Image (tube, rainbow, N blue to C red):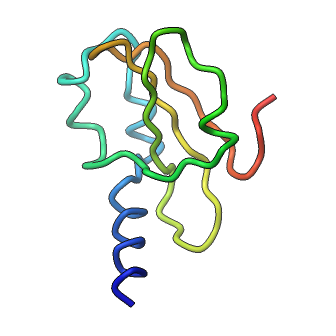
Amino acid sequence: MPAALYLAWQLTTSVLPPSRFGELETGRPRAELSRLLPSRAYPYPPDHARSTPRPPGTACTFYRSGGDLLGPVDLYRLCWDGDTLVAKDTVPAGRARP
């Protein structure tokens, strides 16, 4: 049971609501955007999300778009060049991007 509670905690603390995702502007520093971000990134993005090409020289983090614990949800991907947000996009749940 503790493992299930830990997983539920991980899933719920990595949710970035769509309204906040919409407020994130590329070109802004992480410190300025941190108030909009959840306390942690989603630690288990699926292979299709991790393998989506990213801008060269960036590190990307993933966040869940909703708090549904039982069904798949889209992921938001934020790509950072150092501390600057350079790209943001949505990785649809359960399928590769075109």
The spot of residue 4 in percent (x, y) is 42, 81
Residue at x-position 50% and y-position 53%: 44
Number of dots carrying numbers: 0
Q: Is residue 45 above or below residue 29?
A: below
The spot of residue 25 in percent (x, y) is 39, 18
Residue furthest out toward the right? 98
Q: Nearer the viewer, residue 35 or 58?
A: 58
Horizontal side of residue 92 vs 84, given as left or right:
right
Horizontal side of residue 10 vs 48, given as left or right:
left
The spot of residue 35 in percent (x, y) is 20, 36
Horizontal side of residue 9 vs 96, given as left or right:
left
Q: Quadrant of the N terminus?
A: bottom left
The spot of residue 94 in percent (x, y) is 73, 52
Residue at x-position 38% and y-position 38%: 20
Residue furthest out toward the bottom? 1
Quadrant location of residue 7? bottom left
Residue at x-position 38% and y-position 26%: 24
Quadrant location of residue 33? top left
Residue at x-position 25% and y-position 16%: 29
